[in-house]
Image (spheres, rainbow, N blue to C red):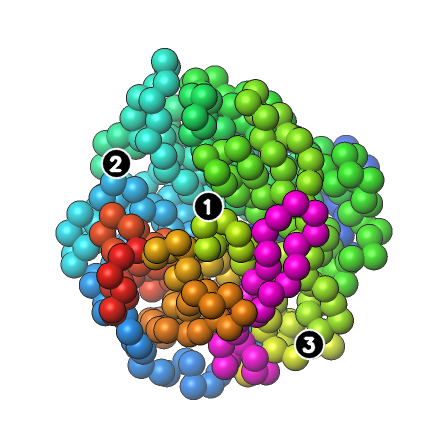
Amino acid sequence: MSRFDKGRVLRVTGMAAVTALVMGWAGAPGSAHQKPDDEQAGLAATAPDITPGPAWTASMRTRNFTVVGHSDLGGGGMNADVWKHRGYAYVGVFSGPCPATGVKVADVRNPHSPKLVSRLHTPRSTSGEDVVVRHVETARFTGELAVVGIQACGDPTEVFRGLKFFDVTDPSSPRKISRYRVAAGTVGCHEVDLAVRSNGRVLAACANVFAEQITGSDEVVLVDVTNPYRPHKVAGFAIGKDHGVDPADNRSNVGCFPATFAHSVRFTNGGHWIYASYWDYGTLRFRVRPDGRLLGPNARTDIAPPDEDGDNHSMTLARDGDTMVVNPEDFSPAGCGQPLQGWGEAHVYTNRDGNNRLVSIFSTRNSRSMRTDGFYTVHNTESAGPEGTQMFSSWYSDGIVWWSLEHRRNPMKLGQFVPPPTEDPTGFFPPVPIVWGVYPDRSSDLIYASDINSGLWILRPTGLRQL
């Protein structure tokens, strides 16, 4: 999921939004819980340590990708995650300069000429980094439902944070339906998901980062939106309260950013399972009961030190679900006093009950290096292709990386797209590629990518018959 002035947050983005806001709230009334030790870690906090080099002047690079279309989405920069649904792309926004500019909606029915058509409003002094859209048919709502994760980026005592729901049946004219407020005084929903279950229940999930350490509240939050006009909480999880692991004093808290908190949530199997990526502790799997309550965790996947920072940023399933890929988002070469060797790798695990087994790792030449003219860590990975063996990763300054898990023990790189370096319109980030989001669209066999500075890119993988 920044610039600081003697502890006061001026602009917060990405993981720095999480840690900086916690720092700013430590003395707020009602914050009786301990704040994390490392308060400035992540993408935005690393930005001042990025040094001029080849990445600042390099040309666009394509290997086994064709660029189909591009839009700067209005030229405001601060682009976050991307989702594609029924002819439209939805691109979240960093907190950046408050007030937030709203989630950007682009018409991509002609992928050669994407056009910004609307925005999903986010409240003043908030960000909306993550957005998910699903088709929903219930007794109270039929149409296209969007959920946006809202985090505070201004005065933490007053602004709304939580989930906002929109009717985007007409994406050019979105309509706010409702919102769900998470515990007061917390950061808000960093990553979100939305699932339509076979029993007709519609569930939204939120990772409310550091909530347990700030206020003792749940960090994994499940909300029933079967009636999206009346969202209500049905389940929650906090690793200390429910699992007996103290997030502030945990032996798994290691590396450049030693912390335990829920960073990401993801439904699988039609909403019958949910995975929570707990930064230094591991990726936890829960069964979701028919009424939405959680059972578990019944599986844990952990990136082990000492050669790794130990971060569990996010995950995806591959190979028809028998394999899990964990993304670490490791900034140690540029943002760590005693850097580890390189920017980390994508970790490939078995996916079963109990503790999963590491099978292999995949990295790029730059992510194995100590170069600091860009951000060379993996952010998100999505699976595609027959049996989910084709992996597409948003790798920040390494762009979009296409790799294969057809042979699980021997991952193989197949292609790469790196957008041209672009000035940050807000003047915060260096002029390098910073590809945040990736979305493989099986309906069109296209890859959608969001770059923080340059906007939305639409790509076609060469030689892949089917996504």
Residue 262 in sight: no
Disc on the earlier residue, 2 or 1? 1
Q: Is residue 353 above or below residue 13?
A: above
Pair 3/1: label in front: 3
Q: Nearer the viewer, residue 25 or 257?
A: 257
Residue type marked 2:
Pro
Can you give x and y, in whole percent of width and height, for residue 386 in the image?
35, 55
Tell me if residue 38 comes above or below residue 420 in the rendering. above
Q: Which amino acid, mark 3?
A: Leu
The disc labelled 1 sits on which kind of residue? Asp
Q: Quadrant of residue 251?
A: bottom right
Q: Which residue is mark 1?
A: 130
Q: Is residue 155 above or below residue 324?
A: above
Q: Residue drawn 42% across and 52% down?
A: 81
Mark 1 residue element: loop
Q: Which residues are magenta?
A: 345-370
**Which residue lies under the disc numbered 2?**
171
Q: Is 125 left, or right, of 77 in this rendering? A: right
